[in-house]
Image: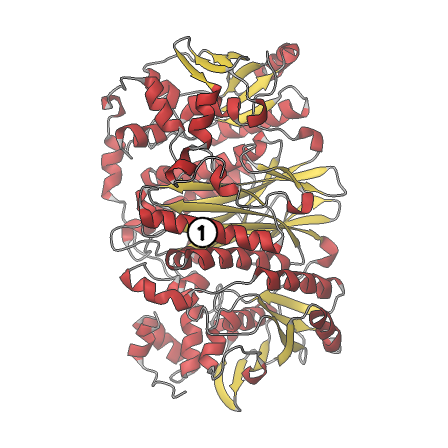
Amino acid sequence: MIEPKVDLNLAIDHGLTEDEYNLICKRLGRVPTFTELGIFSVMWSEHCSYKNSIALLKKLPRSGGRLLVGAGEENAGLVDIGDGLAIAFKIESHNHPSAVEPYQGAATGVGGILRDIFTMGARPIACLNSLRFGSLTNARTKYLFEGVVKGIGDYGNCFGVPTVAGEVYFDNSYKSNPLVNAMAIGLVDKKYLASATSHGKGNPVMIVGSSTGRDGIHGATFASEEISEKSEAKRPSVQVGDPFIEKLLLEATLDVIKQGLIVGIQDMGAAGISCSTSEMSAKGKSGMKINLDKVPLREDGMSAYEIMLSESQERMLVVAKKGFEEKVKEVFNRWDLNCEIIGEVTDDKELVIMHHNELKAEMNPYELVLGGGAPVYHRDTKEPEYLKLAHSFNLKSVAEPESIKEVFKKVFASPNIASKRWVFEQYDSMVRTNTIVGPGDADAAVVYIKETNKAIAVKTDCNSRYVYLNPKVGAKIAVAESARNVVCTGGVPLAITNCLNFGNPYKPEIYWTFKQAVEGMGEACRFFHTPVTGGNVSFYNESQDAAVYPTPVIGMVGLIESLDHITTAEFKKEGDLIYQLGVDYEEIGGSEYLSIEHNLVTGDIPKIDLQAEKDLHSLLLELIRNNFINSAHDVSDGGVLTALAECCIMNREKMIGATVHLPIKSREDFTFFSESQSRVLVSVNPENQEKFEQLTSKSFTPYKLLGKIGGKELTINDNYCFSLEELENLYFNSIASKMNIVKGE
């Protein structure tokens, strides 16, 4: 290969700015080689360097509670759950690849996040996701939706990890740029924790797993630019995954970690060998000398540039302990995987890359990495003009609907409310037999920790309309609701991971929104003592038309100390009493009702009182531990009417009706569809009513008796009656019908 001449124009073609190119030349003391330019371009891309976000992210709470490993320290965050065990978890985006190649984009997103988990020494025990698409009436949306769901399902099912929870939202803002966020959770004995580090002069550097090809070259750069008509030509930047190879890689990786044969290990995700060699060296304050001739290739004639930037999947970089090379090879060979020594650790803090006896790159790895020498920017901010109009909108001017009953049917059957059964039935949620509460059965999923009496509750959450209309408060609500969902299942929230999906950070309005959202998230996390363990920032989520709604997805993990405390959402027993904990303030700004019935996304969103939310959590956990309630379900999207209907039909094998009285403050539609925060519906055995009310009255959380469980209908205020059969059809068949899928197929 004849390498092109490196100059400013070539650097700009690689996504670098003029200032960045000049800085590279200054740092090196010369013009970079073509391979060095490629390495800098991917390592200093937004996807790898977080150059436009790291200054703000450092302000998030990154310690406290049960946290063992925080943000930026390792491949994934880690929290202590006692008994010598810890939970590793992380969420990441694969948005741009999924926009041009939905099946492989989503599949490799799952594969990448799973590798982040087992490089910690943790065995993956569950996956979650957060997906956003345009309207289901659009043919391309259906194509993207089907491809993404199939990609997630196929990879997870073949690998053998249950997909236990997630969320799917539909809005036209995601029409050209879907969001595909994948989360994984693993369990590890703290004795066998592994680190993504490199040290010890002479220790061998090994590449293990699949061979290296040309797929995924400049994938990190592709993820750091806007979607456009040219994006279709970026298909070569989308990697191709093989879940069966990944399963073999998992077993071999855990084996060498458990045997104590290695110093460190890191997944080759974004930027491939460039990232793993530089980040491990920088973390261990060491260097590496790498010979690319030793890298197993699956394509002929690959250049040093291509080998260093390839993002071929199912590969790891391993630093073995000197003298244990053959034992490491024996393990990976046993699993029929490549395992080759490609270099060694040095103590001169230089990353040296050789190919065909030529020096292709020589640089200080610290200069390349996040938190090291990569540039850090503070962008201009400007409050978007649309917010003033939205906040001044008079919600009382909204016309009252002629038929509350018909409006509720529309809301309950809307894609954002209706059951995502069509999605999660394509996932194996029960493999490994740890799943106690799976998709659609409760406010959060519950996964058993075998050989203990414990479980973890896990949830992903974000109402992006709220963040669009009030980024700081909307981000607080995302944290609060994910914590509330965990508490409703009996769990104590421990920590979060996040996936921050925004538009172009160079646009002041976008960066202002990002900054506000990060501030709100940080405030809520500090209040709930749920530190941020890391995650992912995904900028440039916009097309030529507009940016997506700002979408800071929260992945929350909580601990259930006793299996007896696991609580689900559905009504369970005839005669049980229905109570609402918390207060309704008739808040419909940014609500599903306003969007579905009036085609409006406006108004100020519901307020969130973090102390009131925390008081609710404390009360709920005490009620659960005393066995005073039989179910718990939060009131959120769609309002209290939606929450009640879900409680009635969530258990399709034993649906049960209810008779409820909802006091109307000003208007029926405001009461029924209000999305006021910090509210939960609970059901109480009449025998426990006195104990329940005594305990609740001592708390700071208001409560109100709404009605009683029983019958085959949901009756509201003696005026509105919905048969369970009608509710079931609206809720469970809505998305399937929009996807043109015949019921029962």
The total number of labels drawn is 1
Q: Nearer the viewer, residue 134 or 157?
A: 157
Residue extending farthest to the bottom is 357
Q: Pinpoint residue 673: horizontal percent, then vertical percent.
A: 37, 23
Q: Residue at x 37, y 32 (%)?
A: 414
Which SS class for mark 1? helix
Placement of 528 over or under 72, stated as above or below: above
Q: Pinpoint residue 432: horizontal percent, then vertical percent.
A: 68, 47
Q: Residues within 10 Å of mark 1 (few under 14, many from 20)?
A: many
Q: Nearer the viewer, residue 619 or 319?
A: 319
Question: How does the figure colour the protein chain or chains?
Answer: secondary structure
Q: Is residue 518 visible?
A: yes
- Residue carrying label 1: 148
Residue type at mark 1? Val
Q: Where is the N terminus found, in terms of image quarters?
A: bottom left
Q: Pinpoint residue 225: horizontal percent, then vertical percent.
A: 34, 62
Placement of 161 over or under 722, stated as above or below: below
- 41 left or right of 89 in image: left
Q: Nearer the viewer, residue 408 or 350?
A: 408
- 164 left or right of 259 in image: left
- 96 left or right of 442 in image: left
Q: Residue at x 50, y 47 (%)?
A: 129
Q: Nearer the viewer, residue 102 or 90?
A: 102
Q: Residue at x 46, y 59 (%)?
A: 104
Q: Residue at x 57, y 18 (%)?
A: 683
Q: Pinpoint residue 228: horizontal percent, then vertical percent.
A: 29, 60
Q: Is residue 548 visible?
A: no
Placement of 13 over or under 195, stated as above or below: below
